[in-house]
Amino acid sequence: MNSLVMIALCSVAAGASDGESYTEAHQVTVKTGKPMLVMVSTEWCPACQVMKRKVMPQIRERGILSRVAFATVNPDQEGELSRQLIGNGPIPELVMYRKTPRGWIRRVLVGGQSVEAVEQFINQGIAVVDDSPNNTEATENTKKDADTKPVEKTQKQSST
């Protein structure tokens, strides 16, 4: 009985920090218009583990993740999707997509970050309404990637 309780607790704890699958988050974004936040990280990356185990759970506790469709992508398990999201870029990487009247905005936050930095990144991404050059909230990454849509993942990835 105790082992069943422990397994259940571990499952809940893992689910609290991992987020939805990319496909689920993309569907939520398309249906609701919520921005989509994707964390690209691996199991072997120390900074990724700090983000996954310490930073993102605090972001979730603060209620910030409820404002976005959140997903995690592991390049070791979903290599093609990861390459479409960040190329061969560094990890961890947070990628946020937001649809505006003028198209999709893509924002990127690279590397291990503090809770405050991630919170600010998400809040600024949610606040962005327009991707015009006059928008003071737009970053260089945002301007450069203003017409980038989230990847539409149509094939089911097998998990091994």
Image: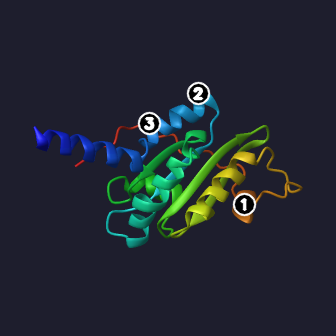
The residue wearing badge 2 is 31
Disc on res. 154: 3
Residue drawn at point x = 54 percent, y = 58 percent? 94
160 is higher (above) or lower (below) than 34: below
At numbered mark 3, what does the secondary structure look like: helix, strand or loop?
loop
At numbered mark 2, what does the secondary structure look like: helix, strand or loop?
helix
Q: Is residue 85 left or right of residue 145?
A: left
The answer to which quarter of the image holds residue 65 is: top right
Q: Mark 1: which amino acid?
A: Lys
Residue 109 position in % (x across, y down): 60, 63
The residue wearing badge 1 is 144
Looking at the rendered image, the disc whose residue lies closer to the viewer, 2 or 1, is 2
Looking at the rendered image, the disc whose residue lies closer to the viewer, 3 or 2, is 2
Q: Nearer the viewer, residue 61 or 135?
A: 61
Number of marks drawn: 3
At numbered mark 1, what does the secondary structure look like: helix, strand or loop?
helix
Residue 21 position in % (x across, y down): 41, 42
Residue 88 position in % (x across, y down): 48, 67
Q: Residue furthest right?
A: 134
Q: Is residue 58 visible?
A: yes
Q: Mark 2: which amino acid?
A: Lys
N-terminal label among 3 and 2: 2
Give the Cα distance between marks 1 and 3.
26 Å
